[in-house]
Every structure is written in C-alpha cells, then in structure tokens.
Image (cartoon, grey):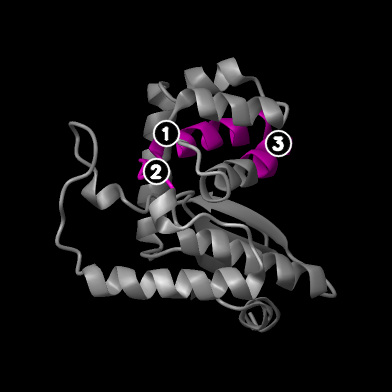
Amino acid sequence: MSDDTLAVYSDFVCPFCYLGRAALREYLADADDPPAVEWRLFDLRGYKRDPEGGFRDVDDGKDEDYFAEARENVARLREQYGVEMQSFDDVPEVDSWDAQQAALYVRQAYPGSFDSFYHATMNAYWRDGRDIADSDVLADIAEDVGVSGAEVRDAVTDERLEAELEDHFDRAQRRGISGIPTFVSGDHAARGAVPPAHLERLVEGA
C-alpha cells in the first residue's frame, strides 16, 4: 500500500461498514486531493463460526442492550447520511465467507472490476436484503459488473482461495485490526463509522 492510500477493513455483513462507506464517500467528494481507497476483507463473525456449519453461541458481551444501542446508532447514521438501508431484522443472517472468497477471486482475476463487485455485494445485502451466502446471488452480482458468474461459482469452492482468504484475515489480526470498519492511513487508524471530518483529519494529519 502506498503512503497516499487509505485502507479500509470491512465485512459485507457489518452495518457500520455500510454506513462508514457513506461517510467515506462524503469525505472523498469534498477532499481537495482525495486518497486512493483500498478495500480490505475482514471476517467479522469468524470467531463464532462452527466448523460443522452456521454459528456457535459465544459469550462476547453483546447482550440485548448492546444490540438495542446498535440499532439506534444505525438508524441515526442512516438518517444522517441519507442512505437506503434495510434494518437489522430485514436482512438475512448469513455467513459472509463465500462472498469474501468471491471478492478475493475478483480482485485477482478481474482487478478493474473489484470495487464494483465489492460495492454491489454490499448493496445487495444491506440495500436489497439478498442472501449473499448464495452462490447464485453472487454469480448474478458478478454478471452485473462484467465478471463471469460461472467463475465466481467455482471460486467459492476453491481450496486455494480459501487458504489465501484465511491468511488475509490472520494478517489483519496480526496488524491489530480487531473491529470494523477500520480506516488506516500511514501509521494512523480510526475505527467505526466515523464522520467525514474525522476521516479528513486521519488522512491529512497522518
């Protein structure tokens, strides 16, 4: 990553990543010299993934009060940034692994289409409420941005890509990324759906 690149660690199923993207767009639109943005994959729910499928119940301190506050914050930021977005209860609870593995494939095979695929997948989940764990949905998204749907279907079962994706997540954790969205500019970072002014300070003061 070059010194003038803003890296963003994010997961498709993270509502604050979707909202942080809206704040980022506002910052980039007003910036005199906007940085290049590099979207990086992060496994939000990996710590509770069950090897047999689905998710395990994990005592992570996120009780009913936590989720009530999170819903309030999502509603506030959704209105603040004027984004079209489904509520927590209207999107399917899915594992984003296959979507992220598909995104990794697109980055490698169709680098010019990666950003379009990334944003289309996030929109499909939070705006349209689609099941992005479904390979047919991922193939449809791919076709819409000029990527082979058949190749994306194959990509989500590719063991090489699975190992590479696991390595991506491990490296992020070793770098100290523990929550998302995390924005990284130089040696500085900001976590959460921070406002555009905060992103400006992060980038221009880094």
Magenta segment, principal secondary structure? helix
Give the secondary structure at mark 3: helix
- Mark 1 and mark 2: Cα distance apart in space: 10 Å
Residue at x-position 51% and y-position 45%: 125
Q: Callout 3: 10 Å neighbours few (<14), some, many (20+)?
A: some
Q: Residues within 10 Å of mark 1 (few under 14, many from 20)?
A: some
- Which quadrant is the C terminus positioned in? bottom right
Real-space Cα separation, disc 3 to disc 2, in angstroms: 26 Å
Res. 133 mark: 1
The three-letter amino acid code for the residue at tag 1 is: Ala
Q: Give amino acid for label 3.
A: Ser
Q: Which callout, 1 or 3, points at the residue further toward the start of the chain?
A: 3
Q: What residue is pinned by disc 3?
A: 113
Q: Are marks 1 and 2 in contact (CB under 8 Å)?
A: yes
**Which secondary structure lies at badge 1?**
loop
User: In the image, which is nearer the foreground, mark 1 or mark 2?
Assistant: 2
In the rendered image, the residue lying farthest to the right is: 32
- 153 horizontally vs 146: left or right: left
Q: Where does the magenta region start and end?
A: 91-117
Mark 1 to mark 3 CA distance (whole Å) = 20 Å
Residue 187: image location, x then y, percent: 54, 74
Q: Are marks 1 and 3 in contact (CB under 8 Å)?
A: no
Secondary structure of residue under mark 2: loop
Q: Is residue 188 visible?
A: no
Q: Which residue is mark 2?
A: 92
